């Protein structure tokens, strides 16, 4: 294999690319997360990307249609999440940059082909190849360990082509082979079954919250949220809005769906999904 320097990576770590430009996005509001799709040849990754996004990737019945990482944006309610299609992984070959791309993403979608002869065996082959690169896929409810001998990445397992006649039997075999803590989502790009469930699961995988910044005396439109990691505080939001807010913040008022209706909170208050925050300096 040809050896190249890290700077030659087609998609460097944590680099969010616009589907229509080579420039990384710098918008805090729209940088909701990045998910990488991986799978064996003909798993249907590109078809899935097309169904989840407005992208129009090349799709073929032959393997290795996708040769380079291909980013696209998936709309989930009022935010966008970057989905990256990648070339297939085989027991014999994995692109030299593939491992770094997986490590740099916020999560992984492992795509299986339920129409294949033995998708459970295909899953084992995929996991084995990743372990050769010192990567271990783990369920969302497992915390990555800094002491693990492998680089651990939270993953959803997507059982594609669930509309085929053999899919029910093959899905049962995959469930038996897979660790029970993994989310296993059967989908069909042909019938669109399972796609909305998958969108929600992808959002959940990222562990982010949507927070709205309110101008005093004005109504808030729930259309353009800031996205922050779960566990973020009022101060984290202030830093995302502008450094002046972070430096001069006195207090905030909060509106939420279940708890608060304009109460004062301090800068250490932990935010929840879809909170509305009014910052006072």
Image: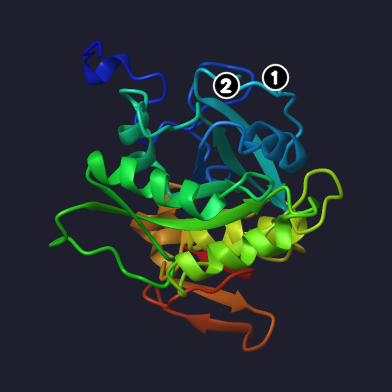
The residue tagged 2 is: 66
- Count every numbered label the image shows and give the total: 2
In the rendered view, would you say 168 is above or below 242?
A: below
* Among numbered discs 1 and 2, the one appearing first in the sequence: 1
Along the line of sight, which residue is nearer the eye, 87 or 128?
A: 128
Along the line of sight, which residue is nearer the eye, 194 or 270?
A: 194
Along the line of sight, which residue is nearer the eye, 185 or 221?
A: 185
Q: Secondary structure at mark 1?
A: loop
On-image quarter of the N terminus:
top left
Name, please, the residue furthest toward the front: 117
Indicate left or right for 186 with 229 as reference.
right
Where residue 52 appears, as percent x and y from the top left, is 72, 43
Quadrant hosting residue 20: top right
Q: Are marks 1 and 2 in contact (CB under 8 Å)?
A: yes
Characterize the local packing of mark 2: few (<14), some (14-19) or many (20 or more) Cα atoms within 10 angstroms. some
In the rendered view, would you say 230 is above or below 24?
A: below
Residue 78 visible in the snapshot: yes
Indicate left or right for 64 with 256 as reference.
left
Where residue 182 appears, as percent x and y from the top left, is 48, 67
Q: Residue at x 45, y 47 (%)?
A: 242
Q: Residue at x 41, y 51 (%)?
A: 124
Where residue 196 appears, as percent x and y from the top left, is 76, 58
Where residue 253 appears, as percent x and y from the top left, is 56, 76
């Amino acid at each position: 294999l040809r050896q190249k320097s890290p700077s030659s990576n087609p998609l460097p770590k944590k680099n969010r690319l616009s589907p229509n430009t080579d420039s990384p996005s710098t918008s805090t509001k729209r940088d909701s997360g990045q998910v990488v799709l991986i799978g064996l040849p003909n798993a249907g990754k590109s078809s899935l990307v097309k169904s989840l996004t407005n992208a129009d990737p090349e799709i073929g019945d032959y393997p290795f249609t996708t040769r380079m990482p291909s980013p696209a944006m998936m709309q989930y309610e009022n935010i966008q999440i970057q989905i990256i299609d990648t070339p297939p992984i085989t027991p014999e070959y994995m692109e030299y940059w593939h491992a770094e791309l997986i490590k740099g993403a916020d999560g992984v979608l492992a795509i299986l082909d339920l129409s294949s002869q033995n998708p459970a065996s295909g899953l084992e082959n995929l996991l084995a190849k990743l372990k050769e690169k010192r990567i271990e896929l783990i369920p969302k409810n497992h915390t990555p360990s800094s002491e693990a001998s492998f680089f651990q990445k939270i993953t959803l397992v997507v059982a594609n082509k669930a509309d085929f006649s053999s899919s029910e039997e093959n899905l049962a075999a995959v469930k038996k082979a897979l660790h029970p803590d993994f989310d296993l989502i059967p989908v069909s790009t042909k019938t669109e079954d399972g796609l909305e469930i998958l969108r929600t699961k992808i959002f959940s995988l990222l562990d982010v919250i949507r927070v709205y910044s309110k101008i005093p005396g004005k109504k808030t439109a729930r259309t353009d949220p800031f996205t922050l990691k779960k566990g973020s505080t009022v101060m984290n939001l202030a830093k995302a809005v502008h450094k002046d807010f972070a430096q001069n913040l006195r207090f905030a008022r909060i509106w939420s769906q279940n708890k608060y209706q304009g109460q004062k909170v301090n800068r250490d208050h932990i935010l929840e999904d879809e909170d509305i925050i009014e910052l006072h300096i």
